[in-house]
Image: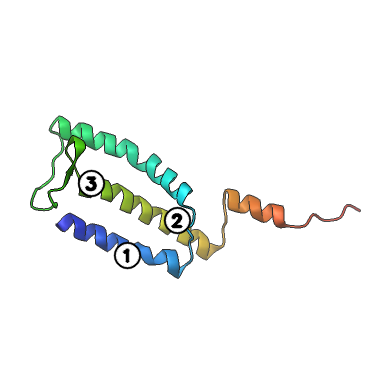
Amino acid sequence: MTYLLVLAFIIVGSGWLEWGLRTRVLRRSRRLLLALAIGSVPFVLWDIYAISVGHWSFDESQVTGVVLPLQLPLEEILFFIIVGFAAILTLEAVRSVRGRPIGDEAANLTAAEPEEPVT
């Protein structure tokens, strides 16, 4: 259960950035899911391997006991999703505060600017 409390603390600690600083991370769900998948899948695979060969285990008194296929505790999947989401929120919050659009946002801003007349 302690594991879930830590995850809840992470959500509370960073979740307000979505609305407080208008990071708009949840509005770009496809991008968010892609980023979380790229960041999480390798670690989930590594966890599955480490658990299967006995290199890694979880204290049963600290987790709920809900175990997913391949002996992966629910909290471990939630960890990768929640920590990844918190990291993305933090990055987007810093960008928002500093006024630094990147990627397609910067391209959209550049495209919206009128061209200067040629003289």
| Image position, residue 66 (x, y; %) | 15, 48
What is the x, y in percent for residue 50?
Answer: 19, 33
Q: Going by the picture, which residue comes out furthest to the right?
A: 119
Q: Quadrant of the N terminus?
A: bottom left
Judged left or right of residue 60, residue 27 is right
Q: Nearer the viewer, residue 85 or 95?
A: 85
Picture coordinates of residue 89, whole percent (x, y): 42, 58
What label sits on residue 91 in the rendered view? 2
- Mark 3, secondary structure of its residue: helix
Q: Are marks 3 and 1 in contact (CB under 8 Å)?
A: no
Q: CA distance from mark 1 to mark 2?
A: 14 Å
Crowd band around label 2 with a 10 angstrom C-alpha radius: few (<14), some (14–19), many (20+) = few
Residue plotted at (27% across, 50% down): 78
To which quarter of the image does residue 53 belong?
A: top left
State the residue position of label 1: 13
Which residue does the numbered mark 3 point to in the structure image?
76
CA gap, disc 3 and disc 1: 19 Å
Q: Earlier in the sequence, mark 3 or mark 2?
A: 3
Using the numbered discs, state the Cα–Cα distance from disc 3 to disc 2 in whole angstroms: 23 Å
Secondary structure beneath dot 2 equals helix
Q: State the scheme by which the image is colored.
A: rainbow
Q: Amino acid at mark 1?
A: Gly
As shown in the figure, which amino acid type bears the numbered disc 2? Leu
Judged left or right of residue 53, residue 15 is: right
Name the amino acid, label 3: Glu
Task: Classify 113 as above or below 72.
Answer: below
**Are the two marked residues, 1 and 2, in contact with CB atoms closer than 8 angstroms?**
no
Residue 61: x and y in percent read 8, 52
Name the mark on residue 112. Answer: none
Q: Is residue 118 left or right of residue 73?
A: right
Residue 72: name its quadrant: top left
